[in-house]
């Protein structure tokens, strides 16, 4: 609640308390018959004022962030044995949550450049069964070699947070803080899949793994094992 909302709430409480005190004092001094009509008028005004102030204090609902358009499987796609295994692995994470079991939160694809990791991750993201399993959306986050150093990683996390959730709260240049913020927002969303592509360093990945163990699955591609 903002400053205005807080002061609005206090003013409403003050009005209600004022009405109560007025009623008590008048009733003790002049008797209940005199206090009753005054208190009714005072009470109604206080009630209306409290309602108006309370309504003003409710934050405007954020417009829903549209789900990303699923990637298209390219015409030249040649099926690979791993593809269905990865689709199953990503979907299985959510099934295990329902049965209450503990889960590893990250699935990984690793291999040299040109191995087909990005193509495979996009194939997984494009599957209708995967899209259906994640009502919070399937989000592709491309990291790459150039995102280096804490400030750049934090900025990347903030940018993706805005794209995924619409949130624009400033979290500064600390990747851990930015990651915690993203994690707390993901925890409030319907099940979401993050496809975190082209990770080069652990420092680039760590902030994206924070929080939301029950509502976010991460599929990571990296050259490193
Ligand atoms: N399943 C596939 N079928 C056909 N071609 C593929 C497939 N996977 C990858 N390729 C080819 O290999 C290239 C590199 O794949 P990419 O997914 O970008 O590799 P990586 O992300 O591992 O560097 C693609 O541009 C495409 O030409
Ligand atoms: Mg790639």
Image (cartoon, rainbow, N blue to C red):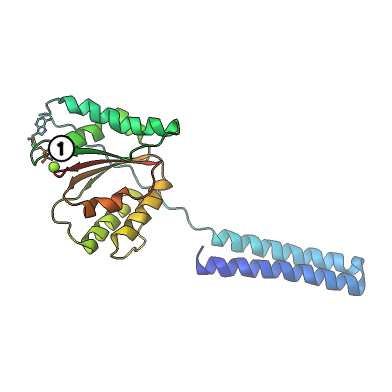
Residue 126 higher or lower than 24, as above or below:
above
Q: Quadrant of residue 225?
A: top left
Q: Which residue is mark 1?
A: 117
Residue lying at the far bottom of the rendered structure? 29
Quarter occupied by residue 27:
bottom right
Q: Secondary structure at mark 1?
A: helix
Sort mark 1 into few (<14), some (14-19) or many (20+) by Cα contacts within 10 Å: many
Q: Which image quadrant is residue 88 in?
A: top left
| Residue 106 position (above or below residue 40) | above
Q: Would the CB of label 1 be found within 8 Å of ligand 1?
A: yes
Residue nearest the observer in this picture, 213 or 191: 213
Q: Residue shown at 76%/68% (left/top)?
A: 19
Relative image position of residue 29 (x, y in whole percent): 90, 75
Which corner quadrant of the figure contains ligand 1? top left
Q: Give the farthest residue toward the left.
A: 114
> Number of labelled discs?
1
Question: How far from the left and from the top, in percent, is residue 204?
Answer: 22, 53
| Foreground residue among 58 and 205 | 205
In this view, the residue in front, 93 or 1, is 93
Residue at horizontal 33%, vertical 38%? 104
Q: Position of residue 95 (x, y in %)?
A: 39, 30
Pick the residue in front: 58 or 200.
200
Q: Residue at x 29, y 57 (%)?
A: 158
59 on left or right of 184: right
Task: Tell me where residue 47 appears, x and y as whole percent.
Answer: 70, 61
Describe residue 64's horizontal placement relative to residue 109 as left or right.
Answer: right
């Amino acid at each position: 609640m903002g400053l205005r909302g807080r002061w609005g709430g206090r003013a409403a409480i003050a009005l209600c308390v004022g009405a109560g005190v007025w009623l008590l004092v008048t009733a003790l001094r002049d008797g209940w018959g005199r206090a009753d009509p005054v208190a009714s008028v005072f009470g109604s005004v206080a009630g209306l004022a409290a309602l108006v102030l309370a309504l003003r204090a409710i934050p405007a609902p954020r417009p829903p962030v549209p789900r990303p358009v699923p990637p298209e499987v390219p015409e030249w796609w040649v099926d690979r044995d791993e593809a269905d295994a990865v689709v199953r692995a990503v979907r299985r994470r959510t099934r295990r949550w329902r049965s209450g079991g503990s889960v590893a939160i990250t699935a990984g694809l690793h291999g040299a450049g040109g191995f087909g990791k990005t193509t495979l991750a996009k194939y997984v993201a494009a599957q209708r069964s995967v899209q259906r399993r994640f009502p919070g959306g399937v989000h592709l986050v491309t990291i790459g070699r150039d995102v280096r150093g804490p400030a750049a990683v934090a900025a990347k996390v903030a940018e993706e947070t805005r794209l995924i959730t619409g949130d624009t709260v400033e979290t500064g240049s600390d990747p851990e803080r930015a990651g915690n913020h993203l994690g707390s927002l993901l925890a409030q969303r319907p099940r979401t899949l993050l496809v975190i592509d082209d990770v080069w360093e652990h420092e680039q990945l760590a902030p994206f793994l924070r929080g939301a163990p029950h509502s976010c699955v991460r599929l990571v591609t990296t050259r490193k094992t």
